[in-house]
Image (cartoon, rainbow, N blue to C red):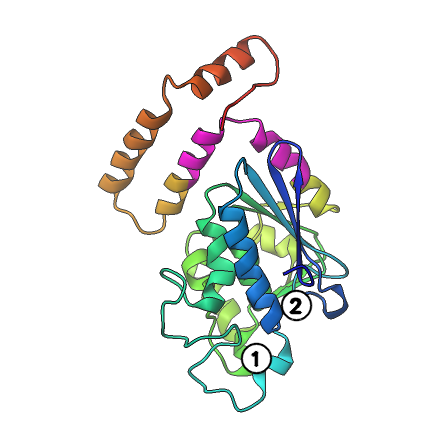
């Protein structure tokens, strides 16, 4: 993983995660696919984790699939990430889908800081973040149709709560590029910033100062919005509230606010 992704823990439980294959605009070769899975697994096991900031070094966030991965005599039923596409090798996902979907499975918020390009799988990894901050000039495209393929890196499951159905269909069918500024208007991006990573780190610091148990519960609730029934969501709201109400961290949140000081939460 060390040649493809770096993870640096910052004060407050913030994980600074960077794609570091800068010479290839962080394109996804087999080593990068595996590094993404390893990074996600490592973060899932990291004690004290509160927020993840995901970005790319160099000129781009992620240029998508390394085109050399399209060649060769590989079985058409297999993925560039390894494994059979139809097999659920990573929970509900295959290996390639996990490179995006795994960020949604992390128990804490993920903030993507996106610049340069986010093509194909890069746009789908971006979509997996809870919050997406993009440079206005970022070039984004759902690229698979250019190569005669369909989107298959978990984008369909992620975009359905972010983008209008007809907009998504047009961008898939045409694979046209759009900018970071347009991404904000369409729902692909949360904020536009001239310095996405700095803005992401600022936002991460705000989130890291909230009750970590309430943040995790809120993410579990947000993750239900795309599939759960009203009854299931209402019940989950109540269940999550019972877990945090009148706990030491919830009381500390109240006291810190009243006393105008930073909270001191326990994990």
* The quadrant where residue 208 appears: top right
Q: How far apart are marks 1 and 2 (CA)?
A: 14 Å
- The answer to whether residue 176 shows anywhere in this view is no
Per the image, the residue denoted by label 1 is: 146
Query: Of helix, strand and loop, which one carries label 2?
Result: loop
Horizontally, is 244 left or right of 128 in the view?
left
Q: Determine whether 145 is above or below 251 in the image.
A: below
Horizontally, is 250 left or right of 146 in the view?
left
Per the image, the residue denoted by label 2 is: 63
Q: Which residue is painted at 44% across and 75% down in the image?
A: 83
Q: Give the range drawn in magenta.
A: 201-219
Q: Determine whether 231 is above or below 227 in the image.
A: above
Q: Which of 252 and 225 is in front in this view?
A: 252
Q: Nearer the viewer, residue 79 or 167?
A: 79
| Crowd class of label 1 (few under 14; some 14 to 19; many from 20; radius 10 Å) | some
Give coordinates of residue 223: x percent, y percent. 39, 46
Q: Nearer the viewer, residue 176 or 242?
A: 242
Give coordinates of residue 243: x percent, y percent. 34, 27
């Amino acid at each position: 993983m060390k040649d493809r992704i770096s993870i640096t823990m910052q004060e407050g439980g913030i994980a600074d995660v960077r794609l570091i294959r800068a010479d290839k605009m962080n394109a996804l070769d087999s080593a990068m696919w595996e590094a993404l899975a390893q990074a996600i697994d490592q973060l899932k096991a990291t004690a004290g984790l509160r927020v993840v900031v995901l970005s790319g070094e160099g000129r781009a966030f992620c240029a998508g699939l390394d085109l050399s991965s399209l060649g060769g005599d590989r079985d058409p039923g297999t993925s560039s990430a390894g494994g059979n596409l139809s097999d659920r090798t990573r929970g509900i996902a295959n290996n390639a889908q996990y490179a995006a979907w795994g960020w949604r499975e992390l128990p804490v918020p993920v903030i993507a800081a996106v610049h340069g390009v986010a093509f194909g799988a890069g746009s789908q990894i971006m979509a997996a973040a809870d919050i997406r901050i993009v440079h206005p000039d970022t070039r984004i495209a759902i690229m698979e149709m250019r190569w005669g393929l369909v989107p298959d890196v978990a984008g369909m499951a992620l975009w359905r709560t972010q983008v209008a159905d007809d907009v998504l269909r047009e961008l898939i069918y045409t694979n046209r590029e759009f900018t970071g500024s347009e991404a904000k208007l369409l729902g692909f991006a949360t904020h536009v910033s001239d310095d996405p990573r700095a803005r992401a780190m600022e936002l991460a610091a705000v989130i890291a100062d909230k009750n970590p148990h309430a943040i995790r519960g809120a993410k579990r609730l947000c993750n239900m919005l795309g599939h759960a029934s009203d009854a299931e969501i209402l019940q989950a709201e109540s269940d999550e509230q019972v877990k945090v109400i009148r706990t030491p961290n919830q009381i500390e949140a109240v006291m810190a606010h009243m006393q105008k000081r930073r909270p001191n939460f326990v994990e």
